Image (tube, helix red, strand yellow):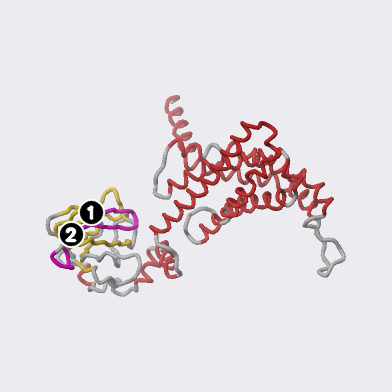
Amino acid sequence: MSPSPFVYWAQNESHIFLRVDLKHVQKHQLNIAEEEIEFTGYGIGAQGSSEVEYHFLIEFFLPVNREESTYLIKDREITIHIQKKEPDWWPRLLYTQQKLSWLKIDFDRWTSREEEEDDTETEEPGMSTQDLIKNRYPEVYEKLQKEELGFISESRRKIYLFCYNLFMLCGFVYVFLIMNLRYARHGDEFIPETYKSVGNVMKMLHLFMILEVMHPMFGYTKGSIYEAFLQVFGRNFVLFALIEAEPRMQEKPAVFYLFMVYTTIEIVRYPYYMLRVYDLEFGILTWLRYTAWIPLYPAGFVCEGVIILRNIPYFEETEKFSVALPNAWNIAFHFPTVLRIYLLLFFFPMLYTMMNHMYHLRCKKLKIRQHVKNRRKKDDDFEE
């Protein structure tokens, strides 16, 4: 492991000042992100007179403005000016409450307010660090609580989410290519063989999608747990309870069309989220993410409805998942009746809920409502 150079820090209300005690810096990499700063490079520091590779990583107490932050490599040191995202005094530099032997206070740049604090980087007088974070920065307090429970750091979270989305994208691209290539070669003869060809891969991918319900639960993403649960549970129910459990359904054309809809949705969704992990965004991809669902979601619901409807006589014949009296628990459960109730009472409300949710997301992301309001205002001004 590379040693860390001495880093001296100070602050004012709007900036963080870092001074890295390293001479003759060469082959360096210095990355300033919103949550952290990382440096790797060769130079002469505390390890002696010869050039040694040094490295340090600092996770900031609060997010910073990476675009407005700068650094300058001098012959005897590196000076770094980091602009805070929101002007305020920080009780400490580090995200976690710890003492690093190589991180020191730069008393030469310390202003009068911070002179009240000593080298231990303690909290402001009269208020503990925990109370300060809880009262003034509730989001940071929640983040610190998660860190104490063993949650991964911000950099590792991003790496994990990027790799997860990339893995899922590759899986659905594989299914999409297999289905289209074999359909192009064999035509309609391939449709009954769809589930045998890609069913196992689809089941594996949808089991991995259960992680998408856990991501917002553990703070890895900011999405809705309720919406994620509805989508993931619904898909897995169709795959495992309605298709996998009934071999006669696996050869129906509805399965082919359903898989085509699923894969088309995901090969647009996963690259969008993969890039958003690192705050990257492409206009055409964003537009597709929040527009492609308009024909695809109703088509997917129709395919699922057909599968449910066609399965009702099959499950009445086999009595699979049904429980008849008498039995040790003295209860009865008729699975085909549950399917009928869903189709009659919940199918269209569920479709409306998902479409309405996506509609509001589309308006928010593409700012459609604001555009319409501005257009109406211009028209009104023109008429006047």
Which class describes the residues within 10 Å of circle 2: few (<14), some (14-19), or many (20+)? many
Secondary structure state at the residue bearing disc 2:
strand
- Magenta stretch bounds: 27-49
Secondary structure state at the residue bearing disc 1:
strand
Which three-letter amino acid code belongs to the residue tagged 1?
Answer: His
Quadrant in which the N terminus appears:
bottom left
Q: Residue furthest top?
A: 383
Whole-percent x, y for residue 104 in the image: 22, 69
Of residues 215 and 167, which is closer to you in this image? Answer: 167
Whole-percent x, y for residue 117 in the image: 24, 72
Q: Are marks 2 and 1 in contact (CB under 8 Å)?
A: yes
**Residue 114 versus residue 342 in the image, above or below:** below
Mark number, residue 43: 2
**Residue 233 versus residue 374 in the image, above or below:** below
**Residue 46 versus residue 303 in the image, above or below:** below
Which three-letter amino acid code belongs to the residue tagged 2?
Answer: Gly
Of residues 269 and 182, which is closer to you in this image? Answer: 182
Q: Is residue 338 left or right of residue 210?
A: right
Q: Residue tagged by mark 1?
A: 28
